Structures are given as structure tokens and as C-alpha cells.
Amino acid sequence: MRVRRTPTVPSGAAAIYETIRAEIVHMRLMPGERLSENELGLRFGTSRTPVREAILRLVDDGLIEVRPQRGTFVSRISLKAVKRARFVRSALELAIIREAAERGLPRAAIEEAERAIADQQAAGNDARRFKDADDHFHRVFADAIGFGDLWSVVESQKAQFDRVRLLSLPDVTPVALLIGQHRAILDAVRARDAGTAERSLSAHLSIIVETATALLRTHPDLIDDDLNA
């Protein structure tokens, strides 16, 4: 395991959990990478107890696995978890986008969504920057209709989703395709066409499972084909 140091080192279990989780989601800790409680304790300047608590939470999240007699490792990307995350996102976001289209959005929200698309274009092949702009675009609609708190539910479910996105951009999933889909979603909301907005969003969200399956063929060491497990 590579010991990473940050300018501000968190020491509580919650802060350690958030730091390691972010590093897994952003693929700074790769699937299959071994973790050492001792090294993490040294890195965070703490005992093994808060480190162990953080690791147990990450095990519950499906991001870390403990293999008896072998050690603690970053989990491979689970196809089952990706599909579950897509299901959760679809259930919440399709309802949100329909409400946004039917209600109509204020000009400020439309402009913010347009800025998010512009940020995606500016990000180019920078996968992390592109992902952040992508998340911003989707959250705009929830915030605009007063349901921004629902995004935390989406966020809690999409860790595997995000790992696939970062692994696939831009080679497996062309950024121009995703930007074009965002434009179609925004145009439908702007036109208050709820049906088209829902269909456009559904097509957009469906890409992730296809992408994960494609990555399984090229990165079998990083993807866990557990859909039928």
C-alpha cells in the first residue's frame, strides 16, 4: 500500500472514513490494493481503533473487503452494486426531472445547469473534473425544486457508479455523448416536456451498466462480475 499524506490529517473515525472513501471513489486507491491498519494509523497520526472503525464502515459500503489470513483490500467494482445504484438513481432522478419539467425552473437554475455543461466541456479528458461537473448538473434539478436533500441518498449509493465513470472516461464513454445527453435533458426541461425529459434521462442513466460490462472485458482484475451471484 502506498502511504499518502495530506496537508490536513484527520484523526477521528468519521474523518478517516471520508478520506479513504473519497480516495477509493476517485480511484486514487485502486481495486485490489492492499491496506494496512498500521500504515493508516501512522498516516493519520492515530491508534488503530478509529482506523478499524472506518474500515468496518467501508466494508459495509462494499468498498473494502477483509480476506481472512490475507489482509484488507480495496474491493473490485461490483456490477451488482452498479446496477443497484442505477436503480436508485433512476427512481429518484426520474421523479425529480418530471417535477422540474412540469413545474418549470427559474432562470437562475437553467443558467446553473448550462454552466455545469460548460464546465464539462472545459474539463475535456480530465475525468475527475468532468465527474464533478456531471454531478453538479444532476443536482441542479433537485435543488431547484426544493429536494436537494435527496441528493445525499443518491450520493450514498453511487460510489461504485463513480468508480466506473472515472475508469471509463474518456475512452469507453465519449464525453461528447454525455454532454449531448445533458443538453437533451435540459432542453426538454426548459420546454416543460416532462415525457421527453424522462426518456432522455433514462437513456443517459442506462449507459453506466453497459459501460461497466464493457470494462469487465478490458479490466477483469478491477471489475467483479457478481450480477448472478
Image: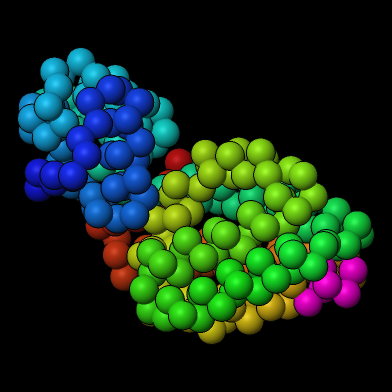
Q: Residue at x 45, y 41 (%)?
A: 229
Q: Position of residue 196 (x, y in %)?
A: 84, 71
- Asked whether the viewer can see residue 154, the reply is yes
- Horizontally, residue 149 falls left or right of residue 56, namely right
Question: Which residue range is magenta in the image?
Answer: 187-192
Left/right placement of residue 13 relative to residue 113 reads left
Residue 173: percent from the left, percent from the top?
Answer: 47, 76
| Residue 69 point in image, percent of width and height | 11, 26
Q: Is residue 123 above or below residue 22?
A: below
Which colour scheme appears in the figure? Answer: rainbow
Residue 118's place in the image compared with 140, above or below, is below
Q: Residue at image x 29%, y 64%?
A: 219
Q: Between 226 and 54, which is closer to the camera in this rendering?
A: 54
Q: Judge left or right: residue 219 versus residue 159.
A: left
Quadrant housing residue 212: bottom left
Q: Is residue 53 above or below residue 153?
A: above
| Quarter of image, res 124 | bottom left
